[in-house]
Image: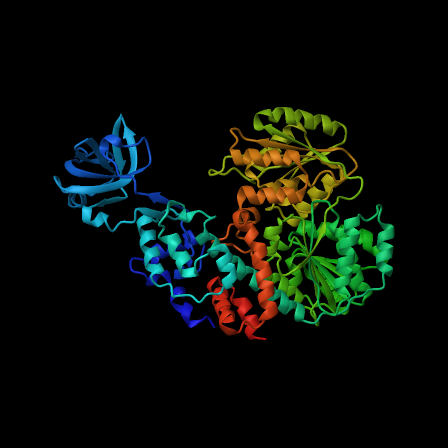
């Protein structure tokens, strides 16, 4: 149950005067809450800047630009000529030093005459502009009397906005919501607050929304740091409580005999890297424990996660259990099935495939074999957690590209086991340490830091799109030598909004130059079509595969040695790195060409420069976080990912480690969150909507 203290904050925004259904719908878009906006959503939506109205001047002292506040006498009103409503309504104002114009478009004359009576004194505040060497102010932010001006905030917060909402409506709603914030108990450690010189929660919130100094809204100030730490502590505390709860669920000991593992390792055409051996040892050690395993295997592109996963899957089978491997796309599921079958079947392991495409008798046969225990390893997409999939004895669940699945999907698959199965999740998206703590803080982590022996570096080049013809000529020369190439375009078809070459258009252009040698792959194609294209590309009957980012994860064609990425400036760093990882997987020297549209912005230029400098996915991920921020980097719409409202990991990353240590200490000393601080911490968890964690405590 939410504490009574917080009930006023979780009232709908429509309870505020002036916020009806239409305005509330705009607020939903503003704060990213499609199901409805509460007062808490408003007060945690902090200003991104402020307007400083302390600069008072005369008309003859007006600057070239900026926000100014001027005391003036109202002169003549100059409405547009009849029938010329598209022209502005002007009001001339003056003081002893000069004249200027106030400009209003689509004005209501009666309203303006009441607002600005001729001959009276007014204080006007807004952005100054110059038109034909004359000063003017379009739609002033404030037009008030001297008396009213004394009540105006001289430092006015500016909020991130959305189309259709005026700053006045947002400011009014914010102030009304702030008035309903109750006095919060102190959930932070007193010594920690004193060390950092941080105020209490209420004082910090008030200082952000009613700034008294120009830097009050900067993310590095004490008030912002305090609120960011509150949010990070709620995140870490919740993750640790979930982890503690899941770890407590008794697992089963999957020790294995090593017999199947030995057969698999001896059949590999290469030796395991040191980090593969180390990660495998960590995973097998966890599986042998009576507590359940919850481990993340994080490896850069091409670092050999699949082999490590297979050794874990084989260990589960050696222990008499079944195992499941869940992946986000059908292409990847079929590829994993083919790869695992090739390595596993000589060792006597049966591997089956289940995706949405398996239907009728074929599907029934797979389901029957799984239920009877005739399938050792089941590979598939989200089809694995449908109700009719019943395992005989599921002991291990491996999930690839974990961030593409929601938490509910993960839990649904685990629920198919009698005892709680061990869980290994993998990601080929290197994640900065700060972000890994917020996304995977409930897991132990193993890292693969090397590439398998024999992998050559990829030669990365950055070229403007004006050099497209040269790239195509070079492609033709490489094709004559038997080289295969990917050509990635960001869109399937032309968009009015985003002007970039579409895959379909690029495919037809290349097909004219290389008849019969160019295929296309995109998300709207049917499964059998995709299979046919991939098969033709793998066999070499197609030399170029034009694709959308559907090939970003996992697609493995060792013979492909060239990657062309069109409009590379529109991609994030991690995505560019994933795409580049599709080449350099064979023995041939590989190259990646990043084509960009001129002119190039500073951030895009920095991004492409980093791609030229390094292939280290972990460094690239850190740079991506710095350049783009966490939400954009991983995609805030992906379920299971935290979206921070206050904390910015690129700035507040150092606070995260402290929050993690604090959370561990709290749960060590007070796992039930009792007593004054424990009760206050429950308020914190509810405030930042980590209700699930509190329910775990109360359920024992």
Could you tell me residue 240's position as x and y percent? 60, 64
Q: Say above or below: 289 vs 527.
A: below
Which residue is painted at 38% across and 54% down in the image?
207
Query: Is any part of residue 213 visible from this angle?
Result: yes
Front position in the image: 290 or 186: 186
Q: Is residue 386 visible?
A: no
Residue 148 on image: x %, y %: 21, 49
The x, y position of residue 375, in whole percent, is 77, 63
Q: Residue at x 80, y 42 (%)?
A: 453
Camera-nearest residue between 141 and 223: 223
- Give residue 113's position: percent from left, percent from top: 15, 43
Residue that lies at the very extreme toward the left in this rendered image: 119
Q: Find residue 697 and report its image quarter.
A: bottom right
- Residue 398: quadrant of the picture: bottom right
> Which one is nearer the viewer's eye here, 125 or 474?
125
Which color scheme is applied?
A: rainbow
In front of the other: 437 or 662: 662
* Residue 575, placed above or below residue 203: above
Q: Is residue 18 left or right of residue 531?
A: left
């Amino acid at each position: 149950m939410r504490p009574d203290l917080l009930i006023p904050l979780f009232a709908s925004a429509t309870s505020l005067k002036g916020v009806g259904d239409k305005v509330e719908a705009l607020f939903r878009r503003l704060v990213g809450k499609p199901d409805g906006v509460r007062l808490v959503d408003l007060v945690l939506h902090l200003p991104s800047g402020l307007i400083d109205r302390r600069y008072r001047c005369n008309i003859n002292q007006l600057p070239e630009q900026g926000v100014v506040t001027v005391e003036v006498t109202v002169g003549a009103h100059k409405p547009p000529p009849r029938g010329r409503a598209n022209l502005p309504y002007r009001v001339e104002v003056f003081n002893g030093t000069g004249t200027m114009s106030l400009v209003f478009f689509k004005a209501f004359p009666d309203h303006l005459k009441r607002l600005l009576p001729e001959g009276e004194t007014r204080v006007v505040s807004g952005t100054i502009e110059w038109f034909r060497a004359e000063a003017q102010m379009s739609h002033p932010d404030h037009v008030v009397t001297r008396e009213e001006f004394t009540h105006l905030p001289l430092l006015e917060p500016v909020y991130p906005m959305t189309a259709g909402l005026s700053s006045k409506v947002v400011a009014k709603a914010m102030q009304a919501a702030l008035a309903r914030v109750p006095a919060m108990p102190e959930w932070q450690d007193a010594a920690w607050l004193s060390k950092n010189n941080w105020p209490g929660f209420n004082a910090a919130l008030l200082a952000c929304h009613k700034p008294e100094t120009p830097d009050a809204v900067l993310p590095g100030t004490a008030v912002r740091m305090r609120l960011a730490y509150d949010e990070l502590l709620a995140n870490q505390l919740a993750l640790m409580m979930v982890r503690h709860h899941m770890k407590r669920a008794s697992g089963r000991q999957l020790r294995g005999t090593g017999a199947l593992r030995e057969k698999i390792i001896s059949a590999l055409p290469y030796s395991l890297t040191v980090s593969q051996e180390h990660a495998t040892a960590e995973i097998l050690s966890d599986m042998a424990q009576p507590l359940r395993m919850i481990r993340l295997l994080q490896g850069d592109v091409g670092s050999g996660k699949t082999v490590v996963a297979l050794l874990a899957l084989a260990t589960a089978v050696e222990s008499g259990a079944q195992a499941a491997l869940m992946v986000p796309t059908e292409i990847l599921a079929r590829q994993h099935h083919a790869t695992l079958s090739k390595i596993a079947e000589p060792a006597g392991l049966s591997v089956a495939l289940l995706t949405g495409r398996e239907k009728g008798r074929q599907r029934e046969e797979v389901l029957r074999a799984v239920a009877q225990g005739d399938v050792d390893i089941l590979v598939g997409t989200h089809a694995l957690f449908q109700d009719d999939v019943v395992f005989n004895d599921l002991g291990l669940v491996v999930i690839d590209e974990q961030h593409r699945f929601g938490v509910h999907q993960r839990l649904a698959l685990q629920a198919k086991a009698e005892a709680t199965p061990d869980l290994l999740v993998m990601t080929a998206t290197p994640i900065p340490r700060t972000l890994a703590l917020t996304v995977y803080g409930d897991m132990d982590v193993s890292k693969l830091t090397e590439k398998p022996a024999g992998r050559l570096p990829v030669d990365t080049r950055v070229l403007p799109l004006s050099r497209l013809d040269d790239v195509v000529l070079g492609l033709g020369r490489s094709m004559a030598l038997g080289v295969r190439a990917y050509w990635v375009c960001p869109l399937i078809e032309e968009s009015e909004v985003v002007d970039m070459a579409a895959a379909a258009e690029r495919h037809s252009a290349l097909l004219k130059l290389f008849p019969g040698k160019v295929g296309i792959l995109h998300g709207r194609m049917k499964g059998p079509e995709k299979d046919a294209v991939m098969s033709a590309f793998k066999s070499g009957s197609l030399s170029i595969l034009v694709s959308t980012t559907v090939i970003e994860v996992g697609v493995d064609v060792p013979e492909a040695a060239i990657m062309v990425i069109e409009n590379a400036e529109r991609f994030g760093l991690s995505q560019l790195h994933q795409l580049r990882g599709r080449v350099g997987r064979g023995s041939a020297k590989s190259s990646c060409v990043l084509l960009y549209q001129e002119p190039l912005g500073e951030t895009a230029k920095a991004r492409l420069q980093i791609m030229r400098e390094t292939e280290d996915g972990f460094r690239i991920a850190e740079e991506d976080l710095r350049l783009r921020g966490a939400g954009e980097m991983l995609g805030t719409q992906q379920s299971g990912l935290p979206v921070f409202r206050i904390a910015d990991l690129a700035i507040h990353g150092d606070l995260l480690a402290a929050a993690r240590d604090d959370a561990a200490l709290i749960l060590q000393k007070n796992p039930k969150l009792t007593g004054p601080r424990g009760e206050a911490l429950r308020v914190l968890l509810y405030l930042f909507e980590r209700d699930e964690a509190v329910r775990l405590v109360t359920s024992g």
